[in-house]
């Protein structure tokens, strides 16, 4: 039996069996076998969740062999096999003149993992991945094949099944509403958190995709502003040498060295953050959308991210700023702050509210516990909803209070997986037994 680990290395397991099905029928057979024997089945994609949401108990189902897309040219709807990785998906879409409506800054995940954990990008004009889901196919805990679509008999299931947490079945296919390919004009540069919040309303209204990274122990931030342009708009990508220097060597190699130094000499972190923020330079470029959205990430970290009401963003960040200064807790990783539109997906972190997403990180060799615990307490006061794939300590009782359709989702789980074939400790924490 081989040990499995997630990307961050903070979740490990030794499943009794590892299966890589090559068809839906093979998934049906293994789920039926597990249900008959009282076993547990857990699908996994890229293992990029920082929570134990994909931790296997008995049988681990690796979906890599279920890959590929089918495009409906008339509607721009795309059926995507569950194990298709985002970095592969965007290239296949581009061949058809299409793109995802929005993306985050990491493209290592599989499509099933991304939609199941309520993955998102930034921009108040666009929802997270779940909002673009219009149908799909899954194998339920009874071994039945369930298909749903917003244009079919099970249209009412789309809001319930767009974000599943892996609790309802093994997703074998996702149908998404894609958009014509487009380019992004990117402007990046240094600023301060004070200045960004002072002009936030105007920025969110004018800029399609906006985010900033705050450097703890300072008021300094790096801003990213991306504006959508048509597919045929002129592109001016970063020169290859500049991309390698800034996005690979400086943002990954050198940043990794700084984090190693920070672990050995925590007292240097405030100074290091100040130097890092002060050396940031402005840059402008344009490219295909997915080439702008995603960035390489080679430095391993742990992450927690919360979706909070728009008005809560500044109070929370100011509280974290005060706490870092008060405690002297060394935090070398910048804090990522993004915005996304609300949707009607039951377990979406943006269910029925536009949301600000605040993501904190700590290097894998650094102690994250005090920092993360304070963040969880500070955001809980504002009705925070945790990204399902990122670390938190919230339980079912709390989550029921911030998800209006929580009990409806649990009831659907009772129907689709009555024997809890897909259960694991994490789902027990967030959904209850």
Image: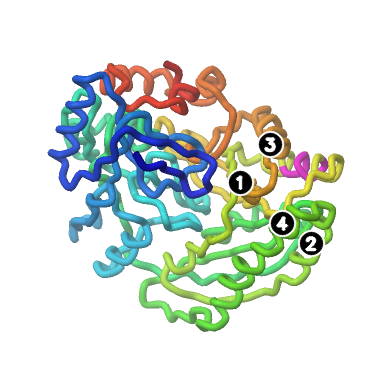
Which quadrant holds the C terminus?
top left
Q: Position of residue 259 (x, y in %)?
A: 69, 58
Q: Is residue 278 left or right of residue 312?
A: right
**Could you tell which of marks 4 and 3 lies nearer the N-terminus?**
4
**Could you tell which of marks 1 and 3 lies nearer the N-terminus?**
1
Residue lying at the far front of the rendered structure = 1
**Could you tell which of marks 3 and 2 lies nearer the N-terminus?**
2
What residue is pinned by disc 3?
Answer: 369
Q: Nearer the viewer, mark 1 or mark 2?
A: 2
Q: Are marks 1 and 3 in contact (CB under 8 Å)?
A: no
Q: Nearer the viewer, mark 2 or mark 4?
A: 2
Element at label 2: helix
Element at label 4: helix
The residue that appears at 32% across and 66% down in the rendered structure is 91
The prevailing secondary structure element of the residues shown in magenta is: helix
Q: Is residue 211 magenta?
A: no
What residue is pinned by disc 1?
Answer: 359
What residue is pinned by disc 4?
Answer: 196
- The residue range painted magenta reads 317-322
């Amino acid at each position: 039996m081989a040990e499995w680990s997630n990307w961050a290395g903070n979740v490990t397991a030794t499943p009794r069996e590892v299966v890589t099905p090559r068809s839906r029928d093979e998934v049906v057979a293994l789920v039926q076998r597990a249900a008959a024997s009282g076993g547990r089945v857990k699908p996994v994609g890229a293992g990029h969740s920082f929570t134990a949401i994909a931790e296997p108990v008995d049988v681990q189902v690796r979906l890599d062999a279920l890959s590929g897309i089918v495009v409906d040219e008339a509607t721009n709807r795309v059926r995507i096999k569950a194990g298709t990785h985002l970095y592969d998906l965007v290239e296949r879409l581009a061949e058809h003149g299409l793109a995802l409506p929005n993306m985050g800054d990491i493209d290592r995940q599989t499509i099933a993992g991304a939609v199941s954990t309520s993955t998102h990008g930034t921009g108040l004009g666009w929802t997270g991945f779940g909002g673009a889901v219009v149908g799909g196919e899954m194998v339920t805990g009874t071994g039945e094949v369930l298909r749903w679509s917003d244009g079919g008999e099970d249209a009412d299931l789309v809001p319930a099944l767009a974000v599943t947490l892996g609790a309802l079945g093994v997703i074998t296919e996702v149908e998404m509403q894609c958009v014509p390919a487009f380019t992004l004009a990117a402007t990046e540069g240094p600023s301060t958190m004070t200045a960004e919040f002072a002009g936030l309303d105007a920025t969110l209204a004018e800029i399609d995709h906006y985010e900033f990274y705050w450097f703890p122990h300072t008021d300094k931030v790096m801003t990213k502003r991306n504006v959508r342009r048509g597919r045929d708009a002129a592109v001016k990508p970063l020169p290859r040498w500049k991309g390698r220097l800034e996005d690979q060597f400086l943002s990954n190699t050198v940043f990794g060295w700084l984090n190693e130094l920070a672990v050995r000499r925590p007292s240097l972190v405030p100074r290091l953050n100040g130097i890092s923020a002060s050396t940031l330079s402005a840059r402008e470029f344009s490219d295909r959308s997915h080439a702008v959205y995603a960035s390489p990430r080679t430095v391993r970290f742990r992450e927690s991210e919360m979706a909070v009401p728009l008005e809560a963003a500044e109070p929370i960040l100011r509280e974290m700023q005060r706490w870092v200064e008060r405690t002297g807790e060394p935090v070398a990783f910048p804090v990522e702050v993004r915005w996304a539109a609300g949707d009607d997906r039951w377990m979406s972190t943006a269910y029925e509210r536009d949301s600000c997403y605040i993501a904190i990180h700590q290097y894998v060799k650094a102690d994250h516990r005090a920092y993360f615990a304070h963040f969880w307490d500070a955001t809980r006061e504002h009705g925070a909803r945790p990204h399902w794939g990122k670390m938190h300590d919230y339980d079912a009782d709390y989550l029921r209070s911030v998800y209006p359709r929580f009990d409806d989702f649990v009831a659907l789980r009772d129907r689709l997986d009555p024997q809890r074939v897909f259960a694991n400790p994490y789902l027990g924490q967030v959904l209850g037994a």
